[in-house]
Every structure is written in structure tokens, then in C-alpha cells.
């Protein structure tokens, strides 16, 4: 089986829009920035919308698939906390949170979406599990990791802010 090279002209408009948003997300993750509590929720909400659209079809395909996706989400929640313990939370002089995004989490999410869009035939050749379910499990893991990581970072921020005696 020969592997074909994918060019931008081979992509349809929907695929190109996914690539645009993926590039935008990556650029936003590369800088250290001041963060408000509500802005921590914007990216998980955005990812939930995109991931939800990709996951919806798999949820209706049976209870076993639903359980596998739930297990993937649970693993992701645990991984998110583990990743968050390695990220330094800073509080500036005005009491705002300063963070640098986790490009690793976003890169994993991007790789899984690209795999779901372009790599189905390759994964299908292995035959262990339905490709759609497998990639959906990984998407649930990355979404869970992002949600729990941000919740943990917010908890750390509130703790540091209380120690510093800075009021909201």
C-alpha cells in the first residue's frame, strides 16, 4: 500500500477550516499571558464544540462505545491534573493569573483530529477496534485533560492569591 502525499488542494473547504482553527489554537498557546478565570473556560468550550461534533456520531453506536469514550474521558481528566502539576502558576501584582499554555496538550488534540479526518483507512487496517471509536476515545481524553488541567490551575491560582492576600 503506497502512501499518498496530501496537499492543500486535496482538502475540501471544511477540512481547510479545521486546519485554520487548529493553527489559530496553536499560536494562542505559545505565549505566556495574563489570564482571567472566565478566559480559562473559552478554549475548553471551543474544543468541546469541535470535539462534540466529531464525537456525536460515535455516541449513538452502542453502550460499549459509550463506556469506552467515558473511560477515555476519565483517563484524560487524570492526565490533565498530572500535566497541571508541572505548570507554574504566577500571580502578578494586580492579582491576575499568568500562565503559558500547554502546547503538548493541543498538539495531541490536533494530531488526533487529523488522524480522525485523514488516517481512517490506515487505522482500519489494524482491525482491533472501530477507527471512529478509537479516535473518539482519544479526543475525549484530550478534552478531559484540558478541562481538568484548567480547573486545577484555577484552583492553584485561587490558593496563591489567598496566600498573597490579594482580594478579587
Image: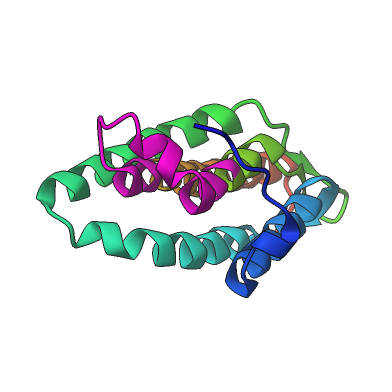
Of 124 and 144, the residue lying toward us: 124
Residue 44 in picture, x, y percent from top left: 54, 58
Magenta portion: prevailing SS class: helix
Snapshot colouring? rainbow
Residue 156 in picture, x, y percent from top left: 61, 39
Q: Is residue 22 above or below residue 87?
A: below
Is residue 121 covered in magenta?
Answer: yes
Of 85 and 14, the residue lying toward us: 14
Residue 64 in picture, x, y percent from top left: 13, 44
Of 89 and 27, the residue lying toward us: 27
Q: Exactly how many numbered labels are in the figure?
A: 0
State which quadrant residue 124 falls in: top left
Q: Is residue 86 above or below residue 26?
A: above
State which quadrant residue 74 falls in: top left
Quadrant, the C terminus: bottom right
Residue lying at the far right of the rendered structure? 93
Residue lying at the far bottom of the rendered structure? 13
Whether residue 131 sits left or right of residue 87 in the image: it is left
Whether residue 78 sits left or right of residue 27 in the image: it is left
Whether residue 88 sits left or right of residue 150 in the image: it is right
| Residue at image location 64% in from the left, 60% down from the top | 37
Note whether residue 95 is visible: no
- Region in magenta: 111-137
Of 168 and 145, the residue lying toward us: 145
| Residue at image location 46% in from the left, 59% down from the top | 51
Residue lying at the far front of the rendered structure? 1
Is residue 167 covered in magenta?
Answer: no
Note whether residue 148 is visible: yes
Residue 165 in picture, x, y percent from top left: 72, 46
| Residue at image location 37% in from the left, 48% down from the top | 136
| Residue at image location 81% in from the left, 54% down from the top | 34
Amino acid at each position: 500500500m503506497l502512501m499518498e502525499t496530501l496537499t492543500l488542494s486535496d482538502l475540501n473547504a471544511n477540512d481547510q477550516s479545521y486546519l485554520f482553527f487548529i493553527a489559530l489554537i496553536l499560536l494562542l498557546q505559545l505565549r505566556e499571558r495574563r489570564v482571567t478565570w472566565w478566559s480559562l473556560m473559552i478554549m475548553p468550550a471551543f474544543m468541546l464544540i469541535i470535539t462534540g461534533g466529531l464525537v456525536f456520531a460515535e455516541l449513538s453506536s452502542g453502550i460499549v462505545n459509550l463506556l469506552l469514550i467515558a473511560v477515555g474521558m476519565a483517563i484524560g481528566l487524570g492526565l490533565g491534573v498530572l500535566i497541571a502539576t508541572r505548570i507554574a502558576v504566577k500571580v502578578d501584582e494586580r492579582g491576575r493569573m499568568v500562565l503559558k499554555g500547554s502546547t503538548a496538550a493541543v498538539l495531541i488534540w490536533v494530531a488526533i483530529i487529523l488522524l480522525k479526518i485523514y488516517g481512517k483507512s490506515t487505522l482500519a487496517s489494524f482491525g482491533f477496534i472501530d477507527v471512529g471509536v478509537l479516535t473518539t476515545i482519544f479526543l475525549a481524553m484530550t478534552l478531559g485533560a484540558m478541562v481538568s488541567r484548567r480547573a486545577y490551575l484555577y484552583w492553584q491560582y485561587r490558593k496563591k492569591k489567598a496566600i498573597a492576600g490579594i482580594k478579587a
